[in-house]
Image (cartoon, rainbow, N blue to C red):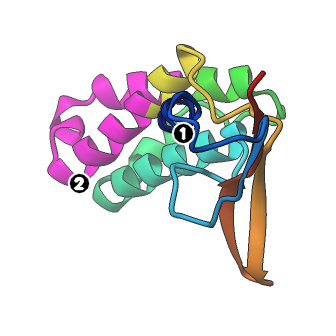
Amino acid sequence: MLIGKTVEIALEKEIIKSKSIIVDATHTKARYNQKSPREFLQEKSKNVRKAVYQLDESMKEKFPPKTTSNEVNDELDYCRKVITVIETEPQIAEIPAVKEKLNVLKEVVEDYAEQLSYSNDPDARVGHKTADSSFFWISNTYSYE
């Protein structure tokens, strides 16, 4: 939007004479996750379970079996069940180490349930400067007629 407005002003003032502008982007830290939604949910539920197990290993018996499906919706259902189990144990749910991770899991589940997802922009890419570091970038060409 900012680029569009800047170009619009520049065209009005006749600073730009061309019909096309190429905008090259550089890498930056962004809210981007290389994990799939299912993997991300698995990680957050695992963090909660680990925090619970440090307090009470007998809780393992109360958690539902992990899903073997590759479906995000199945993982969401599993996470909801984990949340429910922990919330039925207030003496554990209120311990700060568990509560913090539980709240993160709840937020992630809510975000995915509301179908918030990462960019579907076909111009968005992951780039690599080295074999083990990556960054998110977008490079677009804007045309004004």
Tell me where residue 114 appears, x and y as whole percent: 53, 14
Write the residue at 83% across / 36% down. Answer: 122
2 or 1: tag closer to the N-terminus: 1
In the drawing, does residue 71 fall left or right of residue 65? right
Write the residue at 76% across / 41% down. Answer: 18
Instruction: Report the magenta residues as a range.
Output: 80-107
Q: Disc 1 residue type?
A: Ile
Write the residue at 75% across / 34% down. Answer: 121
Magenta-span inclusion, residue 69:
no
The foreground one among 115 and 92 is 115
Question: Could you say whether the residue bearing mark 2 is in a helix, strand or loop?
Answer: helix
Question: In the image, which is nearer the foreground, mark 2 or mark 1?
Answer: 1
Question: Could you say whether the residue bearing mark 1 is in a helix, strand or loop?
Answer: helix
Which quarter of the figure has residue 19?
A: top right
Q: Most prominent secondary structure in the magenta stretch?
A: helix
Q: Disc 2 residue type?
A: Ala
